[in-house]
Amino acid sequence: MVASSLFVPGIALSDVADIVAATDEVAYRWLIDSDSLAWSANACSVLRISDPGAIATGRAFTRLLDAHNTLSREEAVLKSQLRDGGAGVLYQVQYAIQGSPPATPLWVEDTGRWFAGPNGRPARADGTIRVITERHAEIERLSYLSGFDDLTGEMNRRGHTERLDAVLKDAIRFRTSFGFLVVSIDDLARVNEAYGFAIGDEVIAACAKRLRGRMRGSDDLGRLSGNKFGVIVRECESDDLTAAADRFLVAVRDEPVQTTTGPVAVTASVGGIMAPRHAQTVHQVLLRAHEALSAGKLKRRGAVHVFRPDVERDALRRDNMRASDEIIAALNERRIFPAFEPVVEAKTHRIAFHECLMRIRRADGTLVVAQDIMPIAERLGLVRLVDHRMLELAVVEMTTFADLQLSLNVSPASANDGTWWNTLVAAVASRPDIARRLTIEITESAAIQDLDEAQDFVARLKDLGCRIAIDDFGAGYTSFRNIRKLHADLVKIDGSFVKDLATSPEDQIFVRMVIELARQLGLKTVAEWVQDEVAAGMLRAWGCDYLQGALIGSASVAPPWSQAASEAPPASATAAAVR
């Protein structure tokens, strides 16, 4: 029998029944007082019921439902807390009907409206049932994937961290302890490169099985990222955690992983932490376990390292946070500005150019030199912001003073920074002469980190018309052959070889050799940290082209070519020339 709410003006009842049958949906009317169920003609075929009597009453229909259902039509209607205002009360539930065989339940969506009798309680329900087995399976699959890793079948990062959160809360509540391990497959990138990502996936899946095979039944395994697994080791102490970690290491490296292309040797490293003893939140557990892993890898691969509190490390982190806040505040408040150190011709002492150095003025008015802040800025990932600000300041100065020649230090991080590069290109587009007056300094150590990237960066700068200087030469391990590949114009000899030049025979040999080799290769040389006239005389005699340092002049925050020079701060407020 079709519910009255299904009638459409102009369509006969028999036509409506045919339409319902054609859509693979089932219509019903449930008279609650008598518990009788009337169905559309297609009910048995759609619901896969051989005996119509099995669905003749509400009670009989309920017996067909899967025992694991959390809701049924009966509960949705008879236990409803809503009241019928005359138009009925809408309900919609999803449940499974036992299949034949029972292992294949039929999932349906039951949508209808119940109507109240004189006593206000449900008296009749009209509705339709639609089969949603495929849709339910897809929803279940997506739900599974939201918490589990498709490759290994273990919990994914989301599912594992949710489990970790629950275990941590229980441990805090009941004053117990547990261990957490991060197991990292060593050199997975090498495996991917040598054999392909498909083989890398086989290695990951095999390692997951090996870890699972060495776990206790109460422990939990999850995949945190590409090559990292997390293991929750319940109810353990530090010694138990180390023993478990060793067990997992042996499981991974015990024998090569057999893949479709042959055996692949695999090792792993492990970092661990005891919680809640050394971590009170999930974030702390993950962070400190990864820190332990990194610390262990610094010593050697294939080792176990368990987190221990470190007063010096914690103090360093607090210092980093303070430094980060100071740098950000200085950028926002425009308290980063340049200081200019003269570089002169060795023979005439005429100024050739000025090096543009960074200074930060603290809130109390004191100055911070670059050497005190740039290593921290690089470590915290803030150096690009500082470099960009210094470029802006240098461009302003060179635009204002048409004859000014400057050199500017650029960190490796900024070499590939589009914002920094776009600022330089825009400045050169409006004033091409700026490029001819600008020298970009790249440290020797930065140049050899990635020679190909450095070559590309230098080539683009040369195309703009800039000169290139290799800074701090001698502090790293590069060679003149690499410098020639970069097509550098200047070599700046590291000041540590120059400051004691007058009294150090070893430094004299090295500096003289650098100057001679540079001259033969057509490169100009700059000696940094020149302290006295004795050293300056030696450098001139050996053919050094330019001098820089305390003998020549300290870095000044008041440019000598501007009117501000007359308002320069006292010498005590002027930072030293050392970066």
Image: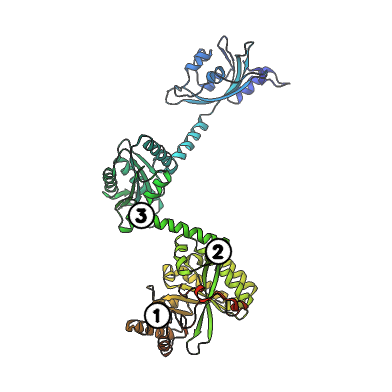
On residue 418, the disc is 2
Give residue 14's position: percent from left, percent from top: 66, 17
Residue at the spot of label 1 = 499
Residue type at mark 1? Lys
Looking at the image, which residue is at 45% across and 42% down? 158
Residue 491, percent from left and from top? 45, 79
Between circles 3 and 2, the one closer to the viewer is 3
Q: Find numbered disc 3 in the image and state the secondary structure of the residue it sits on.
A: helix
Report the mark closest to the observer, 3 or 1: 3
Residue extending furthest top? Answer: 34
User: Which quarter of the rendered picture does the N terminus lie within?
Assistant: top right
Q: Is residue 25 among what the camera can see?
A: no
How far is the residue under mark 3 from the one under mark 2?
A: 39 Å
- In contact (CB < 8 Å): disc 3 and disc 2: no
C-alpha span from label 1 to label 2: 37 Å
Placement of 67 over or under 269, stated as above or below: above
- Tell me the element at label 1: loop
Give the mark nearer the N terminus: 3 vs 2. 3
The spot of residue 26 in percent (x, y) is 58, 21
Report crowding for label 1: few under 14, some 14 to 19, many 20 or more residues within 10 A (C-alpha). many
**Other residues around mark 3 within 10 Å, as few (<14) / some (14–19) / many (≥20):** few
Front position in the image: 340 or 266: 340
Whether residue 286 appears in this view of the structure is: yes
For the residue pair 425 and 510, the one nearer the viewer reads as: 510
- The CA span between labels 3 and 1 is 36 Å
Label whose residue precedes the other's in the sequence (1 or 2): 2
Q: Amino acid at mark 2?
A: Gly
Q: For numbered disc 2, what is the local secondary structure?
A: helix
Q: Position of residue 260 (x, y in %)?
A: 34, 49
Q: Earlier in the sequence, mark 3 or mark 1?
A: 3
Residue identified by numbered label 3: 311
